[in-house]
Image (tube, rainbow, N blue to C red):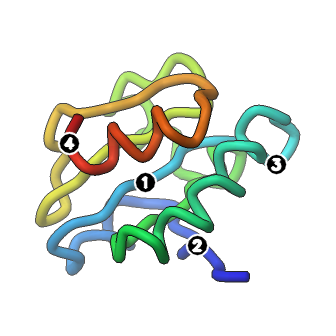
Amino acid sequence: MPTLTPVSSPADIKSLPHVFVLFGASTCTPCGIVKKQLEKLDVELEIRVAVCDKDRATDAWADSLDIKSIPALIEFRDGAPTGRQLVGSFPPARIKSWLVGG
């Protein structure tokens, strides 16, 4: 089973040209469900997905992204958010559609 890259600050993704970051928490059941879906989709779609545990991340990062609910999936290019985000738990088909730009 693939492992998603753990991240905790913007510095962790600065060198990545394109990455999707899942903000969640280990105590959040919907976050775990989305994480399992992403572990399959990152291989299928050949994308880079990272995971940020909000309980371990710098509060300033989550605050700067205005994350109010988790799970929150945010797209980054060259270390900056693109403005695309998907908040909540969705079926795999919906997540896949969002990841490919739909």
At a point 44% along the width and 40% down the height, the residue shown is 73
Going by the numbered disc 1, the residue's amino acid type is Val
Q: In terms of secondary structure, where does tag 3 sit?
A: loop
Label 4, secondary structure: give it: loop
Q: Earlier in the sequence, mark 3 or mark 2?
A: 2
Report how far apart the C-alphas of labels 4 and 1 lie in the structure. Answer: 15 Å
Distance of label 3 from label 1 (alpha carbons): 15 Å
Give the residue at the far front of this rendering.
Answer: 93
Q: Earlier in the sequence, mark 4 or mark 1?
A: 1
For the residues labelled 3 and 4, the Cα–Cα distance comes to: 27 Å
Which residue is identified by label 1?
A: 21
In the picture of the structure, the residue carrying the numbered disc 4 is 101
Q: On screen, 74 above or below 7?
A: above
Alpha carbon of mark 4 to alpha carbon of mark 2: how far? 20 Å
Q: Nearer the viewer, mark 3 or mark 4?
A: 4
Label 4 sits on what residue type? Gly
Toward which corner of the image does residue 6 lie, by quadrant?
A: bottom right
Crowd class of label 2 (few under 14; some 14 to 19; many from 20; radius 10 Å): some
**Position of the C terminus by quadrant:** top left
| Identity of the residue drawn at 45% across and 37% down | 62
Q: Which label was assigned to residue 26?
A: 3
Q: Earlier in the sequence, mark 2 or mark 1?
A: 2
Which numbered mark, 4 or 2, is in the foreground of this view? 4
Badge count: 4
